Structure formats: structure tokens, C-alpha cells
Image (cartoon, grey):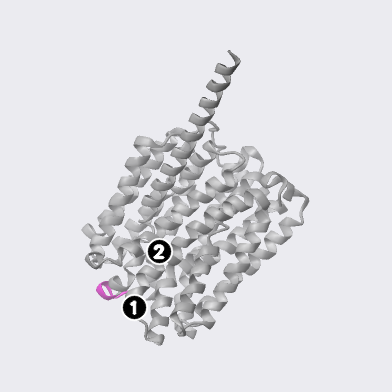
Amino acid sequence: MLKIEFISRASNIDLKKSEKIQNLILLSLTEMLAMGVWFSASTVVPVLTQIWQLDGAGQAWLTMSVQIGFVAGAFFSAIFTIADRIPAHQLLSGSSLAAGLTTVAIPLCAGSLLPALLLRFLSGFFLAGVYPVGMKLVATWTQKDRGLGIGLLVGALTVGSAFPHLLHTFDQLQNWKLLLLVAALLAILGGGISWLFVRTGPYASKSPPFNWKYVGHIFRDKALFKANLGYLGHMWELYAMWTWIPLFLTASFAVSRTSLHWVSILTFLIIAIGGLGSAIAGSLADRFGRTTVTIGSLLTSGACCLLVCVLYGGNPVLLTSFCLLWGFAVVADSAQFSACISELADPEYIGTALTLQTSLGFLLTLISIRMLPVIVAWIGWQWAFSFLIIGPIIGIWAMYSLRRSPRSIQMANGRR
């Protein structure tokens, strides 16, 4: 009897582990397919610049409008506790579908910048039901390995964000309308996968409601403030790099007389390699500590931020190598800032703390994304990325200071 009971328990454990792996894989696949719409329009900026006569501001707004929509969607979902009113896998599915449909509408209905920006805003609004909800679902399947779980999800987000650049390498997808349609259809496919196969895990709990009164406490709590400051330093660099790296490579390759045919595929690789960085960093953070990993990532990305400026217009292989290292490191620490907040905040206010962190981070990206074309007009492409070093410097200071705080033992099971 004891042997039969042991075998039965072992079978149940294996079944649960198998179900967990399956859901994490399908969640990551859904995330990857859905997030392709984020940079779908940004990928075809050179074409739209000619067709719609865009200046630097117009180019920047094609990405910034998504950021604003995402922030609005995140606040709307948090204030009205949407994720607790609708089953998470259904919310993820519906949001992915809606993001895909609003992207479809751009090539079909938008003949100029203004309607395209409105549709991009709506895409960002609906994507707020994809990324944060995906993180919530990961949390229902993970406990001690949560850093790795969220790291895998952010990695999928990264690959998905890079995917339109890969599509752009195919000659038949040089047509900007067709590229947006393909990205949109993939998001719709992701929604279908979520609806049919993704389910909530055994560690599910209701999300704490957003509480404006707790916002002041977040700013007064030194540990939370430092974790948020580290995240803001990271975000200052991340989306500006992702947005403008293809134009930086185009300008550099023109100087070194390298074929521009390589720009789209290299941009895809530079962004997508961050998916590997995110997964590796998640595993390392669970073992060695969140501040250790975030500081290492910020040091690496900050150094690459300056090195690519020095290598501008030179050997394309050397430049690309450091751009790939930059892409690996620049997003590797992303998930760990969210994990820090979830471990440092009062349990009943984790939802408020994470919503505020995400919203402030994406709002900050509006400044760095918009500033870069201004800097390019002022000093040219070679040194334009150097102003992003501000983010890693501030982030390193914040995380080193948090590491020295007694509160740091609350993170990663006591690993700093």
C-alpha cells in the first residue's frame, strides 16, 4: 500500500510539473506573438518617413504613442481590478486579439500619421492586458523559481518585440502594410493559443486593488524608492536603444560602406538576444541575488552604450559584436526589478507598487525616445547614444545602495 501511495504521489508531482512547464511555454509563446505589434510600425519608420513626410518628432511618436497607451491601460486595469474580474487567460487572449485588430486597422484605414498614432495608442492600451497579466499568470505557476519564470516571460516579450525586424528582412515583406498585417495576425494567433490552452496555476490569489494612498508610502519607503530608481535607470536606456538602434546601424554602415541589407536582421538579433539574457539573469538572480544581477547588467550595458559610440563608422563586425552584447545586457535585469518590488512591498499593496513602477518606467521612456532625435540633430549619430549612460549610472547607484540596506534580505530568499 505504501509503495502504491508513493507511486501515486510521484505521478501527481510529475503531472503538476508537466502542466507547469506546458503553461509557462505556452504563456511565453503567447507573449512573443502578441508583443510583435509593439514595434511593428517602428520597424517601417524609414518607409513611412518618405510616404507621410515624417520629421524626427513624427518618427518618435510612432513608438511613444504605444508607451502612452500602455500606461493608460495599466492604470485602467489596476484601478478597476480588471484582472480579478475576468479570468486571466481570457483577459490575456482578448487583449492580444484587440492589439492585433488595432494593428490591422493601420494599413487598412490610416492614411496619415494622426490616425496611425491613435491606433498605436489603442494597441498599447490593449498590450497592458498582455504583459502584466502574463506576469500574473507566471506567478500562479511559480514560487522559488519566480525570477526565472518572469525572466522567461520578459525574454519572450523581447523576442516578440524584435520579430518585426526579422519579418522586414524578407523581400516580400518590404511592403509596410503587409508587414503590419503579418504582425497583427501573429498577435491574434497568440490570443487563440491563450484562450485554448493557457490556464491559471495553483498559486493564484486575488490582486490587491490599486490604492492611491499607498503611492506616497512607496516614495517614502527607502528600499522601494531605490528599487524603483534602479528600474527607471534601466528603462531610460532600454526603449531608446530598442527604438533607434536600426537607424544608428544604418548611419554607421553608410559611413563604413557596409551593405544596408544587414540592418534589419542585425537589429532583430541585437534585440532578440535580450531574451536569452533575461532568462539567464532570472536564473542567476534566484541563486545569487537580485542586486548582484542588476548591477552586473547595468555595468555591462552602460559600458556597451559608450563603446558603440566609439566604434561608430568603423569595423562593422566589431560594432555589431558590442551591439549584440548591449542587447543581451540591456534587458537582462528587467524582470528582476519587478521581482524586487513584489518582495519589498507590503503584500496587500503589491498591485499598486507594480502598477506605479511600470507606469513611471514607460512614461520615462517618452523622454529618452523623444530626446534622441534632438541630440542626433545637434551632434550627429556617433555620440547620440552616449546620453543614455545616465540611466545605468543612476541604476547602479540605486541598486548598490539597496544592496547595503537591511531590507535587501527580503529579496530572493535572503540573497542580495
Residue type highlighted by circle 2: Thr
Indicate whether 16 appears above or below 168: above
Taking depth in this image into account, of 176 and 319 the one nearest to the observer is 319
- Callout 2 environment at 10 Å: few (<14), some (14 to 19), or many (20+)? many
Mark earlier in primary sequence (2, 1): 2
Say which element carries label 2: helix
Say which element carries label 1: helix
- Residue 58: x %, y % from top left: 36, 71
Q: Which residue is mark 2?
A: 63
- Residue 296: x %, y % from top left: 64, 63
Taking depth in this image into account, of 18 and 119 the one nearest to the observer is 18
Check the picture and name the quadrant holding the N terminus.
top right
Residue at the front extreme of this rendering: 3
Q: CA distance from mark 2 to mark 1?
A: 22 Å
**Would residue 344 be seen by someone viewing this image from the given angle?**
no
Q: Which residues are magenta?
A: 50-54
> Are the residues at dot 2 and dot 1 in contact (C-beta closer than 8 Å)?
no
**Would residue 5 be seen by someone viewing this image from the given angle?**
yes
Q: Which residue is mark 1?
A: 260
- Callout 1 environment at 10 Å: few (<14), some (14 to 19), or many (20+)? few
Q: Closer to the camera: disc 2 or disc 1?
A: 1
Label number found at residue 247 = none
Residue type highlighted by circle 1: Leu
Say which residue appears at 67% left-offset and 46% top-offset.
Answer: 412
